[in-house]
Amino acid sequence: MTINAAKHHNYIVRAIGGEKIKYVNEIIQGIESNKGEIKKIEAAYKENKDKSVLVHFHVNDLTSIAQIKDNLENRFGEADIQFMDEITHLHLGGKLETTLKHSIDTMADLAKVYTPGVAQVCMEIAHNPERAYDLTVKKNTVAVVSDGTAVLGLGDIGPEAAMPVMEGKAALFKQFAGVDAFPICLDTKDTEEIIMIVKALAPTFGGINLEDISAPRCFEIEERLKQELDIPVFHDDQHGTAVTVLAGFLNALKVCEKNIADVKVVLVGIGAAGIAVSKMLLNAGVKNLIGVDRNGAIHRGEPYSNESWNEYARLTNPDNLQGPLSDVIEGADVFIGLSGPGVLKVDYLKTMAKDPIVFAMANPAPEISPEEAAPYVRVMATGRSDYPNQLNNVLCFPGIFRGALDCGARQITEEMKLEVAKAIASAVSDEELSETYIIPDIFNKEVVKRVRDAVVETAHRTGMARIRNNKLESLTV
Ligand SMILES: NC(=O)C1=CN([C@@H]2O[C@H](COP(=O)(O)OP(=O)(O)OC[C@H]3O[C@@H](n4cnc5c(N)ncnc54)[C@H](O)[C@@H]3O)[C@@H](O)[C@H]2O)C=CC1
Ligand SMILES: CC(=O)C(=O)O
Ligand SMILES: [Mg+2]
């Protein structure tokens, strides 16, 4: 398998203030003389009307960037220029803002959207709370809730540091499924407190997407909220990931002509994502699955303090293998990583069965780099956006909530998840299927549509839907 990854070394220099714009030519010269390639020059205005010019440029190697930075900082002061990479620039001030559906230009407008007009709408909801779905943002709004304890594979980095990921998830909800989502990062790791806060927030939202909350607390938080709330609650790292892996897994087996009941699967990282992925693979027909965490294979014979691992040991590892990854991976057909960077070594790959399938899904750095693995694997997938075969829960969560909101499903069920996995897999036709195309990307318009339709169809078939033709069944409108 050959791997071509996109590499981004894009930067921006901001020349500040109307008078300073005359320096732009000097800035361009400073960039070009150090092998920078100018991509775009644009005028920009800050809120205080300060005029500035943004010079976007690209470098092929990181030594040039140090030279360009030194060169410009020697010539200009902090008041004249700001220098940053394009990713930081994209995050300045956050990635989201509120927009209005109706402009408020006159006192008459004000009297309708605000007091006194709004009071009649409030009272209508007070008399019939279901009307909140028609008359407020609840109908189309999801809370993306995190406590910052398992942010990507970066670990427990806290609620403030989790915000860029949660803003990103909210942006993806809107971009791909038209769902309005809001990031909420909580300054508590206490299970009961998180449950209490999310329950108190629920009246505002049509659904709750839990994100990057570490195991095992995430299991109880999700279960309790599902029982105690009447809106869908979905822990994305568990179920969004499980659905996506199953979709990629089914297609990868087709490419390699392997049978689900015969393959040996080794999964590393028995946390939120790893446990949910394992359960979904077992439900789909995998028989020989071995889970590995920091102390080696999870097996029967050791009482774990983490109760979810005792259950895991009962469900998996039919031969009760023990030992480190380097031992148990021998003869495996599939490796799935939901752990951290560098866990999988080339030497281990060499001991796998013929035509190995490797899903190295830790973010942002996978268990093995695709470049290292490529010569030894038949199918390689990561969670990243810059390699082929992106296995990432973004394929699932926007469409699954679109469907649940559209049909008023109170829960996202096991049947829905299974149908969604098949729907994602089906977006790659047999003719298109190949080693480097086992999974569609999220820009494939079929993905969200098929996921949404699978949820709505399953909800109606299984009696979970409350809305037909986009109207609440309990309403007379
Ligand atoms: N591509 C995708 O769509 C997704 C990827 N992930 C990735 O999966 C990883 C785990 O995420 P969560 O399950 O939410 O976190 P978690 O904190 O609930 O679980 C992580 C588990 O991995 C284990 N682990 C970490 N480093 C390890 C190592 N070196 N060797 C063996 N075990 C190790 C931990 O002990 C823990 O049991 C993260 O890197 C995350 O970015 C998670 C969700 C979706
Ligand atoms: C993709 C994702 O949700 C994660 O890595 O945590
Ligand atoms: Mg996540």
Image (spheres, rainbow, N blue to C red):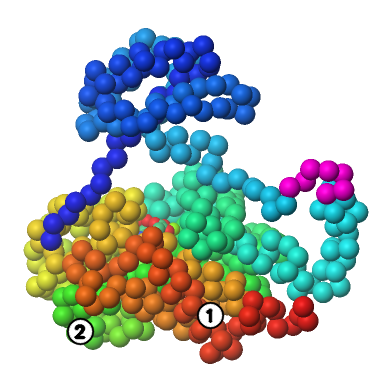
Point out the stretch of residues depicted in magenta.
Answer: 103-109
Residue nearer the viewer, 45 or 174 = 45
Q: Residue pushed farthest top?
A: 75
Q: Residue at x 37, y 53 (%)?
A: 153
Residue of label 2: 259
Sequence-wise first label, 2 or 1: 2
Which type of secondary structure does the marked residue at label 1 adopt? helix
Q: Is residue 211 magenta-colored?
A: no
Asked if residue 381 is positioned above or below residue 372 in the image, the reply reads below
Toward which corner of the image does residue 425 lie, by quadrant? bottom left
Few, some or many C-alpha atoms within 10 Å of disc 2 (few <14, some 14-19, many ≥20)? few
Q: Residue at x 27, y 75 (%)?
A: 429
Q: Position of residue 189 (x, y in %)?
A: 56, 55
Ligand 1 quadrant in view? bottom left
Residue 410 visible in image:
no
Q: Residue at x 81, y 53 (%)?
A: 113
> Which amino acid, mark 2?
Asn
Residue of label 1: 456
> Which amino acid, mark 1?
Val
Asked if residue 380 is positioned above or below residue 415 in the image, the reply reads above
Q: Position of residue 450 (x, y in %)?
A: 43, 75
